[in-house]
Structure formats: C-alpha cells, structure tokens
Image (cartoon, grey):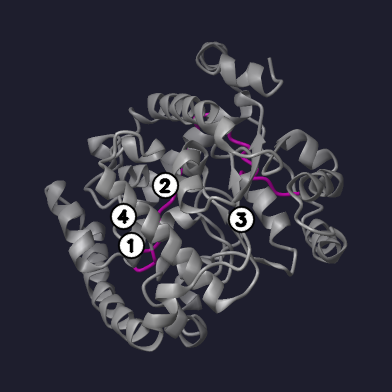
C-alpha cells in the first residue's frame, strides 16, 4: 500500500538522485513569462546548459499559456467569475511524507469527489479549453514514475494545488528548489504570516478561482492536498468558511529522513543552476518547516468549527484503511461511505504489494529529531 514515500533500500542520506530529461515538464513550465522571468532575474539567471534549455522552453510554453488564458477568458470569463464549488472543499493536511498522498488517493476514489489533476496544476490558466485535446498529445513528456519515489505519474493523476498556485505566479517555499544554491526562499509564504495584506488577498483569490474552475469542469466536492496548507488554516477559513479538513500525522523518525530525501530530489530535478545542487541547508529547513507549520496549526486549529476537522495517524490508516475512512466520513459528515467503497477496494487491491520505506537513522540524527520535534511526537502520540 503506498504512502507518500516509496521503498529506499539505500538508507538515510543516500542518493543517487537522478535528473529528468531537459524537456520534461517541471513546476516552472506552468508560469507565464512575466511571472517566471522576475524570479529568474532575482537569482541572477546563472543557469546550467540544461537550465538554459529549460528556461527557453519555459518562455516558449509561457507564450502558449498567454494565448490559452486569453481563449479561456473569452469563452468562460463570465462563468469563471461566478463559479463556486457546490459543496465545501475538503483539505487534506499534514507534513510532507506523513501519508497525505495515500489519504488523498483514497478520498478521491469516491465518485462524488473532485481533485486537481497534474495537467490542471501545470496549466491553471487554460485547462478548461486545452486539457481534453492536449493531454493525449503530450503524455510522452512525463516519466512513468516520479523522481523521488516510484509513484506513478500522468497528466490525469492527482496533484498538489500548491503547484497550481506556483504556476499562477504566487510565491511559495517550493521556489527554493529552482535555485537551491541560494538556500531557502519565501519562508513566510508557508504560513502566510507576515505576508502583506494585499498579497495575501491575491493568494486567496487565486485559490478561489482555481477551485471555482475545477467545480465548473466537474461537479462534486473538491478535495485538495498540499502540505503547506497545514500552516494556513486562518487564511483557508477566510477563503472557504464552510471548508472541511482532515489531518494526518506520522512518526517523526520516519518523517525526517523521508522529507530530507524528498527535498534533495526535488532540488536535483527542478534546479536551473550550474553544477550539482547544494543540500547543506535542507536538513535545517526541514526542521524549521515542521516547527513553523505546527506552531501555526496549533494556534489556528481552534478557529475550525466543531465537526469540520478530523485527525488521524498514518499508522492507523495503514492498519485499517476503510475503518479509518469511515471514521473521517462520519466525523466530517461527508455522506454515506458506501458509494466510495468500490473505488477504495479497487485501489487497495492495486497497491497491496507495496512496501514502505525503511530508514536507518544515525544515532545523532535520531537525537536531533526527538529534540527538535519532541512536541510534535508528544502531540500525536509518538513520544
């Protein structure tokens, strides 16, 4: 059964990490030229040959996005302006590698649920007019598996809406992967604390428009999964006052090495800079991100009205997936679980041979994790 990580028999801190081909879509391919180039200029545009090719393709594809955006506005502008989800969205929350991918995959097996696809997150400006005819033509651009694990890829596969926000030109800590030699950037956009009010309002409007466009394409409850949203409850509730939330936690001794490997892999794949990406900042950034995330989550959790937040542990979800899901449905009043059961059964059957990661943490790293993330471990029952 898959979680948000895949088997790694090489142990903690062991790479090799591999590159995609230069033409393979990256997160930045969804950006318009006037969003991408300021980011590149801020970082000196000192790119590798591979990065130069990627930069050229981003610019070219960005021009296609501009045309597609104009066509979509012409055909759907009025409808999009008034598009609203017919049911409150459901946000899957939790730290990276905590099992959010597994939980999201199970929830979207319900035919009443809607989710953003990889294509829609890469092309949020125009997917209403291009997805149906373009994705069959560009399926060859995607590798069969993700670079950091063995999760299947595809334009129709579920994706984090954080990448749609990135494609829409909004700032995100994920920009750190583009120029990893400069270290982490946009840390305040993890929690949205300290972000100017106008920029925060723009962020909310972009998310509302994206959810509205999804609802216009496919009716149903929109289920969104993005780990940074765990730290944004206050803003999400302003954007969607009736939203539902489900949070998943996991043993921090598994979270830490898996997240470090994830960030290293994404720096390796997404970097536009010359030479091997630098990873010396990643471990501290992983430590700080969880601390910032759960300071914000603990502060704002009380804002969620009763009956709109369910919390579970990854270990319990793996032990009894259907039982855990039934509990979520009951706690959040998502309706009868029976219509979702056939899809859930089919997914569990497909993934029955999955084996989770096993990491051997050095003693000093284990001690640091327990020291830095001790409050998380205690809060979620891992102490």
Q: How many marks?
A: 4
Question: Residue 284: x and y, percent?
Answer: 39, 24
Within 10 angstroms of label 4, few (less than 14), some, or many (20 or more) residues? Answer: few
Q: Which residue is mark 1?
A: 168
Secondary structure category for the residue under label 4: helix
Q: Of the residues under marks 3 and 4, which one precedes in the sequence? A: 3
Residue toward you, 373 or 350: 373
Residue 24 is covered by the magenta coloring: yes
Magenta stretch bounds: 1-25
Q: Name which residue lies at 52% across and 48% down.
A: 226
Is 74 displayed left or right of 149 in the figure? left
Is 217 displayed left or right of 107 in the figure? left
Give the CA separation, mark 2 to mark 1. Answer: 20 Å
Locate residue 380: give its quadrant.
top right
Q: Of the residues under marks 2 and 3, which one precedes in the sequence? A: 3
Give the CA separation, mark 4 to mark 2. Answer: 27 Å
Q: Which mark is residue 151?
A: 3
Is 104 displayed left or right of 270 in the figure? right
Give the CA separation, mark 3 to mark 4. Answer: 33 Å
Q: Of the residues under marks 2 and 1, which one precedes in the sequence? A: 1
Quadrant position of the C terminus in the picture: top right
Is 56 displayed left or right of 20 in the figure? left
Q: Which residue is mark 2?
A: 266
Q: Which residue is mark 4?
A: 202
């Amino acid at each position: 059964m898959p979680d948000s990580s895949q088997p790694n028999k090489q142990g903690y801190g062991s790479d090799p990490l591999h590159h995609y081909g230069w033409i393979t879509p990256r997160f930045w391919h969804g950006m318009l030229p006037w969003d991408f180039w300021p980011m590149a200029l801020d970082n000196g545009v000192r790119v590798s040959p591979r990065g130069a090719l990627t930069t050229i393709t981003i610019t070219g594809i960005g021009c296609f996005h501009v045309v597609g955006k104009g066509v979509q506005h012409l055909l759907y502008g009025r409808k999009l302006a008034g598009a609203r989800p017919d049911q409150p969205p459901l946000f899957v929350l939790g730290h990276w590698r905590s099992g959010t991918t597994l939980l999201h995959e199970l929830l979207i097996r319900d035919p009443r649920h809607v989710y953003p696809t990889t294509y829609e997150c890469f092309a949020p400006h125009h997917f209403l007019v291009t997805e149906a005819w373009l994705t069959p033509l560009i399926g060859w651009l995607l590798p069969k598996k993700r670079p950091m694990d063995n999760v299947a890829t595809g334009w129709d596969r579920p994706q984090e809406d954080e990448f749609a926000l990135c494609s829409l030109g909004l700032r995100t800590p994920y920009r750190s992967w583009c120029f990893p030699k400069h270290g982490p950037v946009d840390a305040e956009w993890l929690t949205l604390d300290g972000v100017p009010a106008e920029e925060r309002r723009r962020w909310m409007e972009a998310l509302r428009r994206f959810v509205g466009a999804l609802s216009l394409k496919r009716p149903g409850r929109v289920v969104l999964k993005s780990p940074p949203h765990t730290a944004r409850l206050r803003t999400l509730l302003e954007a969607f006052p009736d939203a539902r939330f489900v949070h998943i936690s996991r043993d921090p001794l598994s979270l830490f090495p898996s997240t470090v490997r994830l960030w290293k892999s994404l720096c390796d794949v997404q970097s536009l800079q010359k030479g091997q990406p630098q990873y010396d900042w990643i471990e501290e950034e992983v430590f700080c991100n969880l601390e910032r995330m759960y300071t914000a989550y603990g502060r704002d959790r009380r804002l969620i009205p009763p009956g709109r937040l369910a919390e579970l542990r990854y270990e319990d979800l793996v032990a009894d997936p259907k039982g855990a899901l039934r509990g979520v449905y009951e706690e959040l009043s998502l309706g009868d679980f029976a219509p979702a059961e056939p899809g859930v059964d089919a997914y569990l059957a497909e993934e029955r041979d999955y084996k989770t990661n096993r990491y051997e943490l050095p003693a000093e790293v284990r001690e640091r994790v327990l020291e830095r993330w001790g409050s998380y471990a205690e809060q979620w029952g891992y102490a």
